[in-house]
């Protein structure tokens, strides 16, 4: 599917994604729970494609559905009791803009790997080179449907703080061996006016794996 068709599909099914996201919130109560659940769903999805229980077009549609639903649920979790539905509405354009173009590239790449025989339907070998294996594919699927929930949770929280009149924000990196220089730099900037610091995973090399926290005052 080309990018415009993907965006067209997402726009048409917007209401369904909101309904699915709200249903998901009855099953998960926190962002780590959401991330864990979506990681499990990624395994089922990749296994379904590998074992031919799912056709390519079903897989593609599920990837789009789960990426959008997961991001919307994460925003709502970040919003808590503070009008989660309204916060999802507010985040929709950001979610579409941030997630669908890279997702389109990733789906195209996956399809090419399948067509070229670099990953083969029904193949259960686990020791191929990472980018051309089913385990390698799973790692990347998780990066679309599970990991971004941290960033979108932070966005939901940000909307609440903005509504509550907070004036400054600080991005606090979790300092460990994986923390990238960008996150360290944002951390050193300390308190900044609301809206001037990027959300976790934005403008840093950690991307979806960024676990920076945002504080407000
Ligand atoms: Zn980083
Ligand atoms: Zn970070």
Image (cartoon, rainbow, N blue to C red):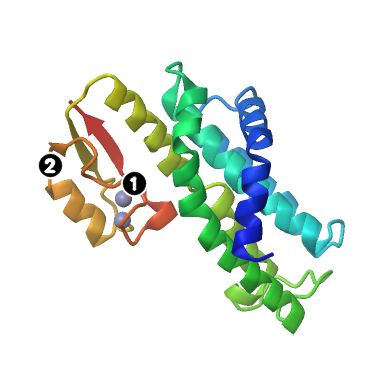
Specify few, some or many for label 2: CA neighbours under 10 Å numbering under 14, 14-19, or 20 or more: few
Count of residue discs: 2
Q: In this view, does 23 lie above or below 120?
A: above
Residue drawn at (43%, 29%), measured in percent from left and top? 78
Residue 215: which quarter of the image? top left
Residue drawn at (62%, 43%), measured in percent from left and top? 38
Residue 13: which quarter of the image? top right
Disc 1 target residue: 200
Q: In this view, does 143 lie above or below 129?
A: above
Evaluate whether residue 58 shows in this view: yes
Q: Is residue 156 left or right of residue 141?
A: left
Q: Nearer the viewer, residue 86 or 80?
A: 86
- SS class, disc 2: loop
Residue drawn at (68%, 45%), measured in percent from left and top? 41
The answer as to whether callout 1 falls within 8 Å of ligand 2 is: yes
Residue drawn at (30%, 22%), measured in percent from left and top? 163
Q: In which quarter of the image is the C terminus?
A: top left
Q: Quadrant of the N terminus?
A: bottom right
Which percent across, then down, holds residue 46?
72, 58
Q: Which mark is residue 190?
A: 2
Which percent across, then down, holds residue 169?
20, 35
Q: Extreme bottom residue here?
A: 116
Evaluate whether residue 40 shows in this view: no
Residue 82: which quarter of the image? top left
- The quarter of the rendering in which ligand 1 is drawn is bottom left
Q: In this view, does 135 lie above or below 30?
A: below
Q: Which of 33 and 196 is in front in this view?
A: 196
Which percent across, then down, holds residue 199?
32, 44
């Amino acid at each position: 599917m080309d990018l415009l068709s993907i965006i067209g599909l997402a726009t048409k099914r917007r209401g369904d994604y909101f309904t699915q996201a709200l249903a998901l919130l009855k099953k998960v109560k926190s962002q780590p729970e959401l991330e864990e659940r979506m990681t499990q769903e990624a395994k089922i999805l990749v296994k379904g494609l590998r074992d031919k229980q799912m056709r390519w077009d079903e897989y593609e549609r599920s990837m789009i559905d789960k990426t959008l639903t997961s991001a919307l649920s994460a925003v709502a979790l970040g919003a808590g009791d503070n009008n989660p539905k309204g916060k999802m509405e507010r985040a929709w354009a950001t979610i579409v803009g941030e997630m669908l173009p890279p997702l389109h590239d990733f789906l195209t790449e996956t399809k090419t790997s399948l067509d070229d025989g670099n990953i083969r339907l029904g193949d259960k070998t686990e020791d191929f080179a990472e980018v051309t294996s089913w385990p390698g594919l799973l790692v990347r699927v998780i990066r679309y449907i599970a990991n971004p929930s941290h960033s979108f949770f932070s966005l939901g929280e940000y909307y609440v703080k903005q509504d509550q009149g907070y004036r400054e924000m600080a991005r606090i990196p979790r300092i460990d061996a994986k923390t990238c220089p960008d996150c360290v730099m944002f951390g050193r900037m300390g308190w900044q006016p609301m809206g001037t610091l990027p959300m976790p995973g934005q403008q840093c090399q950690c991307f979806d794996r960024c676990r920076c926290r945002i504080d407000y005052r």
